[in-house]
């Protein structure tokens, strides 16, 4: 590369690092540097840069830091020559725990609800919408083989995919191999548990060896990651049968991917929301018993709400993210999308285990008890959210029915409100972390192949987040966590609707909703 181009890259790189990559200033100053035949930042350039960054230093202070600023140019250039493995997280680990939190580390028996004494229906496809517990009963009692159930679900996936567009890659051969193995094991008396022989689908930002993991983006079309994600391995260990890589919105945002839009089974004219679009749509359509999705900011909750399934967004640090695309090291989570809450419990039990890869994961028991007397629980409900004036009436009616059902079960509900929290300022965390995760992708110009060109520009914008502001935002996040924890400390459980919907069902900008909108992550 000519010296001129290299020096220019260093120069622009510096101004990107202090938040000027989206302005005309770096280019103008570079022209001035060339006119002056200079190769370093001058005091005048530094003064303008600080002004655009909203900072004001004295002449003496600017002179004192000028040498360090120029030294940084060389460091940045050296740093950007280092290829960083996408699976490598920074050695700074976020914890969702606040001071004083006491964790129950005592393992107790997993108590599922009593199984129903069901018989195999005349038409196996009548089981397409059955919960995991019922399907597991048929398989364990050997009324149905895993191969039969797998073939039925594969047939539905192939049949409805042209309408709903929820599959990126079918894994038929792998599925039948796993189903045959499950049947052999069960016949020999080796029953692994309620997921043994159960068909499932995986969001396509999660790596499966031998199959493409394309992150919903044409820029990564054909990408094969030779890694088995921890969640895939744990479900394989539980005997589950993988049918397909299911769609994700491009780079884990929305329901639009390089193959089009994933649709809502209830009304295919509408999008499924996202970004766990395929897992939500395929589960709702009775094509898989459950899906595995991811969430950074609504990507399990939103499509679950839109498609009418039960999604579990686990607490950060409960499920390993090893082998999944990173959007935010401190916010990404992996969780199930199922038909029922107990289905989520079955899946969560299998995947909530440390793996020595994702060091944020805690080794904690999951003590599920379907026989727990919920009347003894202290339950709060977020009253203002249920009364949100702009919420669509049929949504509000559904929310009220949920509260009425809890009351009918004997639950005493106590209203509460959240204090005014400065949550809006924390948005920069996702921008900074996703920008770092995709830094090489952006710097090498690969974002030109994105379907949504705005994603690349958004990641460039992350250059406008100074390091100090990022850390200060994380500290504000800690303040919010403490205030929130104090507010809900008197409850065992609190109830709130998914409120990021406006009238008409469409999500606010960047949020979950119909018509192709969707949350990130």
Image (cartoon, rainbow, N blue to C red):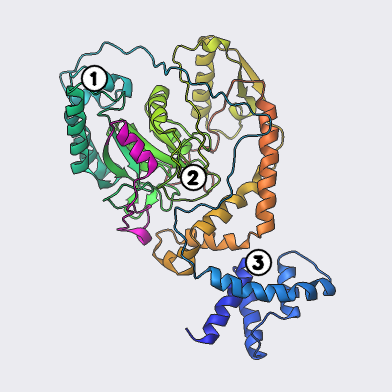
Identify the residue at image location x=47%, y=38%.
302
Disc number for residue 25: none
Residue 63 in percent (x, y) is at 79, 76
Give the mark nearest the N terminus, 1 or 3.
3
Tell me if residue 207 comes above or below residue 441 in the rendering.
above
> Magenta stretch containing residue 219, yes or no?
yes
Residue 204 in percent (x, y) is at 35, 47
Q: Which residue is mark 1?
A: 140
- Is the C-beta separation of discs 2 and 1 under 8 Å? no
Identify the residue at image location x=63%, y=20%.
491
Foreground tag (1 vs 3): 1
Segment colored magenta: 213-241
> Magenta stretch containing residue 244, yes or no?
no
- Is the C-beta separation of discs 1 and 3 under 8 Å? no
Disc number for residue 18: 3
Cα gap from disc 2 to disc 1, whole angstroms: 38 Å
State the residue in front, 82 or 369. 82
Give the mark nearest the N terminus, 2 or 1.
1
Cα gap from disc 3 to disc 2, whole angstroms: 28 Å
State the residue in front, 5 or 385. 5
Q: Which residue is mark 2?
A: 519
């Amino acid at each position: 590369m000519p010296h001129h181009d290299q020096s220019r890259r260093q120069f622009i790189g510096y101004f990107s690092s202090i938040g000027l990559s989206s302005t005309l200033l770096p280019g103008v100053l570079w022209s001035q540097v060339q006119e002056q035949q200079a190769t370093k930042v001058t005091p005048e350039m530094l003064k303008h840069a600080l002004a655009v960054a909203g900072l004001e230093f004295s002449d003496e202070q600017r002179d004192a830091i000028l040498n360090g600023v120029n030294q940084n140019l060389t460091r940045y250039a050296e740093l950007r020559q280092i290829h960083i493995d996408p699976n490598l997280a920074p050695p700074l680990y976020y914890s969702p725990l606040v001071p004083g939190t006491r964790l129950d580390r005592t393992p107790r028996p997993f108590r599922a609800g009593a199984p129903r004494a069901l018989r195999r229906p005349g038409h196996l496809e009548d089981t397409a919408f059955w919960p995991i517990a019922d399907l597991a009963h048929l398989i364990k009692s050997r009324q149905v083989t895993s191969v039969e159930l797998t073939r039925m679900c594969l047939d539905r996936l192939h049949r409805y995919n042209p309408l709903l567009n929820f599959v990126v890659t079918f894994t038929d051969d792998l599925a039948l191999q796993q189903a045959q193995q499950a049947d052999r094991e069960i016949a020999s008396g080796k029953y692994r548990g309620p997921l043994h022989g159960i068909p499932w689908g995986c969001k396509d930002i999660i790596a499966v060896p031998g199959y493409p993991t394309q992150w919903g983006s044409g820029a990564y079309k054909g990408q094969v990651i030779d890694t088995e994600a921890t969640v895939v391995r744990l479900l394989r260990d539980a005997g589950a049968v993988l049918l397909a890589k299911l769609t994700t919105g491009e780079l884990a945002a929305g329901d639009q991917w390089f193959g089009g839009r994933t649709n809502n089974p209830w009304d295919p004219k509408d999008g499924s929301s996202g970004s766990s679009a395929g897992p939500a749509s395929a589960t709702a359509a009775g094509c898989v018993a459950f899906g595995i999705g991811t969430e950074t900011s609504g990507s399990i909750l939103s499509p679950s709400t839109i498609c009418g399934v039960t999604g579990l967004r686990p607490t950060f640090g409960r499920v390993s993210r090893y082998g999944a695309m990173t959007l935010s090291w401190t916010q990404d989570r992996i969780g199930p999308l199922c038909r029922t809450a107990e289905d989520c419990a079955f899946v969560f039990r299998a995947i909530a285990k440390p793996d020595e890869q994702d060091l944020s994961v805690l080794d904690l028991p999951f003590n599920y008890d379907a026989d727990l007397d919920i009347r003894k629980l202290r339950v709060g409900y977020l009253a203002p959210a249920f009364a949100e004036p702009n919420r669509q009436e049929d949504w509000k009616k559904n929310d009220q029915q949920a509260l009425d059902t809890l009351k009918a079960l004997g639950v005493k509900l106590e209203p509460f409100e959240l204090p005014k929290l400065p949550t809006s300022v924390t948005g920069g965390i996702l921008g900074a972390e996703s920008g770092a995760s995709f830094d090489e992708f952006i710097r090498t110009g690969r974002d030109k192949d994105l379907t949504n060109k705005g994603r690349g520009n958004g990641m460039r914008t992350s250059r406008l987040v100074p390091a100090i502001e990022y850390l200060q935002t994380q500290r504000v996040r800690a303040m919010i966590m403490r205030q929130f924890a104090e507010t809900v400390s008197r409850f065992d459980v609190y109830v709130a609707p998914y409120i990021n919907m406006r009238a008409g069902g469409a999500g606010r900008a960047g949020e979950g909703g119909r018509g192709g909108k969707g949350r990130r992550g």
